[in-house]
Amino acid sequence: MVWLRAKIGLKTRLRQFSTTVRRRIDDEGDWIYSQEWWGGSKSNGQTVFRSTSDRGNGVVSVVAYPASKPSRLYWTETEKWLDQRYAELNLGHERFKILGYQWRNLHFNDDTRQSTAKIMAAYRESDPGSVFIMQQANCLPVPYVKSMVSAGMAAIASARDYDLKSAVLGTKVMNILCIGHGGGSLPLFLASKIQGAIVHIVEIDPIVISASIRGMGFPSFSVVSPSGDHLQPKPNPLDELLWKGIHERLFLFESDAEKFVVETTNIYDMVFIDAYDGDDIFPSMLWDPNAPFLRALERQLHPEHGTVVVNLHSDLELDVDDDGSFRSAIHQIPNVGKYVLGVGQAYKEALMRNHHRGSGFAFNVAVPWLCNSSLVVSRNSGMLVNNNRDSALDILASKSIEVDNILNLPFSCLPYIKEGFTLLD
């Protein structure tokens, strides 16, 4: 949930953007818009949620900033979609009006940005007071989330026994676990893009859950009891109107991550871990080889293609050349700091301990524009790389193009895979 911005000037970042990232006009989360939500001070924003956590996250707040996209030219199209959906649900005839779009930043302790999402605000024309907000599921504004999606999906797509396309089309189930919720942009994106995805989300802080729903437009129906039953007996008409069944495949648990993984009997195809607290710390229990978490995760990860993706702060100073590329060249080994390398080795050893010898792999990639990295450990039974970095990167780069097309992504995966790619021994 936490990210650290690399010390790169605006001109350099835009130059790097123009040379390494494929531009797509439909990516409203493109880094080119980051000045709207990153550059603005809190005094220029509007606080829409604020509460004090007793789970170590301090003051939890959501701050709103205006969004320039989509332009008003496209609002009518979305209003018509809402009208049609309302009629399809046999709720009568109604006209909806869009108030606008905003960026919503989730903060801990008034400083640390934990999550960013774009929301749409709208209301029923017959009742101007019926304002509701909807998080825009297709918009991933923070590069580290795109990095996690890109690296993780390319890894599982390279598995011999896994048919990603069938999961995307909904003809097979894909069980996903997200540890750490924030504003919910990652699980919502996965559930919206992969029709067969059943997404379990674990968040220890009830205040963060409230902030994501009330302040960042995450589906309220997703909240479940410890047994996994939705707290609402059935979706309300607004959830049905906005989410078209996506909300029924999201299961948001209020739970400690270690407790959840130790007690669950679910087998997961993919696990995404993004869990920083109010002090900007990745809890040691989530990577300590002697703690129960990793031992339990080893049991709950699919034995043939199970893939784990972890968001980490980089502990490496990233120098930037004149052309905008990182001076920590991808061919230098190692090009990750001791902390990232230590976490990576802990995950690889724990998850690959009883796996088929010679298959499966672990790698780390740097996140463009930010001081973050994505760690991936994949029990890939079909990818034999024999610790050959170039071979692994070639396979993942090829699969990333398939992922782009199968998921119809608004961004290209490739830049988020090749930057600082390091195969972990």
Image (spheres, rainbow, N blue to C red):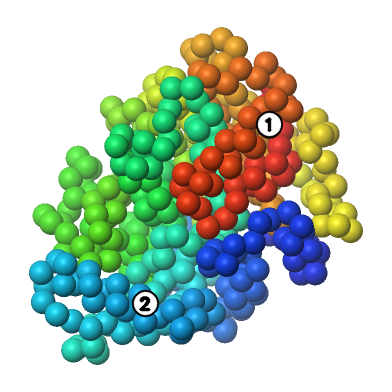
Q: Position of residue 424 (x, y in %)?
A: 68, 26
**Residue 77 marker:** 2
Amino acid type of the residue that numbered disc 2 sits on in the rendered structure: Glu
The quadrant the C terminus occupies is: top right
- Quarter of image, res 163: top left
Say if 318 sits above or below 362 in the image: below
Outermost residue on the right side: it is 322
Q: Position of residue 267 (x, y in %)?
A: 34, 28
Q: Nearer the viewer, mark 2 or mark 1?
A: 2
Residue 398 seen anywhere in this rendered image of the structure? yes
Say if 385 sits above or below 339 in the image: above
Q: Looking at the image, which residue is at 80% across and 30% down? A: 333
Residue 279 seen anywhere in this rendered image of the structure? no
Say if 271 sits above or below 6 in the image: above
Query: How far is disc 2 from disc 1 in space, using C-alphas?
Result: 41 Å
Amino acid type of the residue that numbered disc 1 sits on in the rendered structure: Asp
Would you say the residues marked 2 and 1 are in contact, meaning their CB atoms lie under 8 Å apart? Answer: no
In this view, the residue in front, 353 or 196, is: 196
In this view, the residue in front, 34 or 68, is: 68
Which residue does the numbered mark 1 point to in the structure image?
Answer: 394
Q: Looking at the image, which residue is at 52% across and 23% down? A: 380
Q: Looking at the image, which residue is at 50% across and 81% down? A: 71
Residue 313 appears left or right of 377: right
**Residue 14 marker:** none
What is the secondary structure assignment of the residue under circle 2?
helix
What is the secondary structure assignment of the residue under circle 1?
helix
Residue 154 appears left or right of 118: right
In this view, the residue in front, 170 or 303, is: 170
Q: Decide: few, some or many residues near mark 1? Use Cα within 10 Å; few <14, some 14-19, many ≥20.
A: few
N-term mark: 2 or 1: 2
Q: Position of residue 212 (x, y in %)?
A: 38, 63
